[in-house]
Image (cartoon, rainbow, N blue to C red):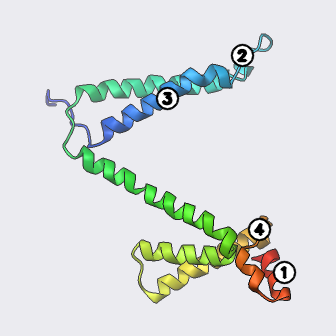
Amino acid sequence: MSAEPKRAKPGEFLFVGLFFAISAFLLTQIGDQAKFSAKGKLFAQPAFWPGVGVIGMVLFTGLHLLTHMRQQTKDGTGAEIVVWLRAFEFVGWFMVYVVLVPRLGYLPSTVLFTFLLALRMGYRSPAMLGWAATSGVAIVVIFKTLLGVKIPGGALYEYLPDGLRNFMILNF
């Protein structure tokens, strides 16, 4: 074994620091969110198990943070953070989908969304794009028909003939 401490991965210190800060904030809020009552056993108190969980988060994340303070960090933290931030692109995709559903309707929005996400992920073959669109149709059928999830019809459906419009609003 070498005497040199293990080198931390890029971005690991930042992640642990953020997690510790969030855990500490949750610990400060536990008294307002869950209460101890005068009656009942300790383990049955509403605040006991959430308190145990949050205290554990603070304790173990704090210990993890202390070990990272002693380690040397590898270069590349900035690049690691950029990778993390790239995940927010998909939050944007989802927000566009949420905006489109009331306008286009659930079926067209879902098929378009799955098709465009397949393109975004690098799929270019007609077969894969067809499977993406088919999965969009399957999602709509499962949620609207089989599970009975109530999703309002899109404004686009208003331009359809009466019988087709009612069918699309009720089923897709």
Give the quadrant of residue 158.
bottom right
Label 3 secondary element: helix
**Marks 1 and 2: which is nearer the front?**
1
Q: Which residue is drawn at 48% across and 82% down?
A: 128
Residue contact at pointers 4 and 3, CB within 8 angstroms: no
Camera-side residue: 134 or 108? 108
Label 4 secondary element: loop
Q: Give amino acid for label 1.
A: Asn
Real-space Cα separation, disc 1 to disc 2, in angstroms: 53 Å
Relative side of 59 to 7, left or right: right
Camera-side residue: 50 or 90? 90
**Pointer 1 residue:** 166
**Pointer 4 residue:** 152
Q: Which residue is drawn at 69% across and 23% down?
A: 34
Real-space Cα separation, disc 4 to disc 1, in angstroms: 12 Å
Tally of numbered tags: 4
Give the quadrant of residue 35.
top right
